[in-house]
Amino acid sequence: MSETLSELLKDDSFIRFLKGNASEKEKEQWTAWMQQSAKNKQLAKKAQILLNNGIQTVPKPDSDLELERLMERIDSEHRYKPLQEVKRKHKKMVWATMAAAAGILLLVGFLARHTLLQQNDGTESSRATSINYQLIETTSGQKTMVHYSDGSEIVMNANSQMRVPERTTGVDTMRVWLEGEALFSITRKPKNNSRTFIVHTPDGNVSVLGTEFSVNTTEGQSRVVLKEGKVRVEVQDSLSKKNLQYDMEPNQMALFSQSLDQIKVEQVNPEVYTSWASDSLVLDKTPLSELVKRIEFTYDVEIVVNNKALLDKKLTGRFENLDLSFILEGIAKTLDVDIEKREQTVYINGKNDS
Amino acid sequence: MSANQIDYDNLSPEELWKKLCQGNKKALAALFDDYFDALYSYGYRLTPNTDLVRDSIQEVFYNLWKYRKNIDQPDSVEAYLFISLRRQLFQKKKKMKRREDVNKKYFSEEFDALLNYQVWQHALDLQEEENEDLKEAVTELTPRQREVIYLKYFEGLSTKELADILQIRAQSIYNLVHDALENLRIFLDE
């Protein structure tokens, strides 16, 4: 048996002995060993102190209250509110409405990713009960399309889930619940039979009157990109009731979040934000930081960029092949960096980095 | 306590598991009671966010209750609870990370097992200077090494349970422990 503390700590049997999990035979052995010498006894004592008190304790919540919370939830499921959600109560309502319905409208929103599929916003549920909904999910690198008889289409990007109605007929308000990213192409109904289309996201609703737009809920802010037509973005703070609005022009991107008190507007190339739906990836002076987010979301990988200066580098171009290794190779060549992929992590290192 | 009442405090986690699977809520409560502190301490070191850890523990036990008819009895109930919490936390963390600024926090794993250095200094009879070196040596361990050390030495989990929780081979657990102890050896064996 060992003579040093570090050797003893490697011995599973010794640890079992100190933790009180040892077999009778092991107990006998170690007790005998301790009696062999004062030194052994001393070693065992040191190890015991380290194992019992050698770690800093963290302040713990009252376990009785936690148990109460669990039991309440089991007894009446609907009353349960996770702490994370309670804290998010003061969020702003976000929606975009279509002002002029001519042409194609393109809308991309980046909203907080959240468990909206189970979420009931209270105002919508009663009328929707007669419609059957189905849940569609995509995994990493996967895309899926939903076609409706009236020609409406929804393309869902990877790592997303969405609850959609099974049909569009006989519905004046079509609702979907999205977590992730999707591109909607909604067929307009005749004038006096107009239909409202609403995408529910954790932050609010995006409602339009038959058009093409895309919504993404993977970031902590909302992003609307308009390709054609006219769109109104409205943000309402549920507490102050203060309204912000902006009428967007084509090729504009509007950014707004729960923490910003204004709607930021930029000129953009809309293709950059929708190219994923047509199996290509378009970059137009896109910073690497942006591309990194997109790749992480689409391929469910983690990207580590060691040299932060690289994140500001801008890329322009088009990938027609959406194979991850192909894209990474493209980045490596364009930025002259080393890229290494180990399991689900991608490391991007500048060539001169140590 | 009358004779026909069950003393839940003296039941093993495996016995509690069997009872709760039969729909016994008291067994669920007893299991919760037995493991809440240990799970919280572990979870907090994976993600120092009280609310997140508390919610995740709720999730673990709620799911256990909800799916009790479909879950097979695990070899180790303790390891099962740790695995479930770990999974819950990583899922929630991943969702949260997506919302965070790019590259602000790119750790594939974190584990903050702070030692009680006073106890170490005293037990190992270290000089002030050596104690500083020990702190540095612990900081230099990988998050995974810290997690293994925490679960093995402070939670008393077996190598097999650790391999299940961390989803790696038992041999890799031995290696992690071995390498970590080698780094700390000069302090341990002085």
Image (cartoon, coloured by chain):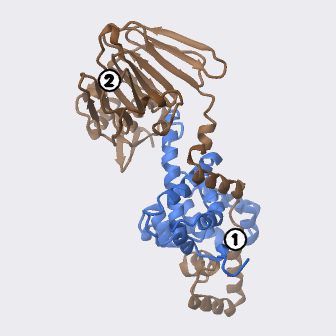
Residue drawn at x 46%, y 70% as measured from the top left = B73
Q: Are marks 2 and 1 on the same chain?
A: yes
> Does residue B141 appear left or right of residue A47 in this picture?
left
What chain does mark 2 sit on?
A
- Chain seen in blue: B
| Whether residue B135 can be seen here | yes
Q: Residue at x 38, y 11 (%)?
A: A251
Up the image or down, A348 lies above or below A24; here it is: above
**Horizontal side, residue B177 vs residue A318: left or right:** right
Asked whether, in this view, residue B85 is left or right of residue A241, the answer is left
* Element marked by disc 2: loop
Q: Which mark is residue A52?
A: 1
Viewer-closest of B101 and A66: A66
Image quadrant assignment for residue B124: bottom right
Q: Which quadrant holds the C terminus of chain A?
A: top left
Chain A colour as displayed = brown
- Front in this rendered view, residue A348 or B47: B47
Of residues B97 and A41, the one nearer the viewer is: B97
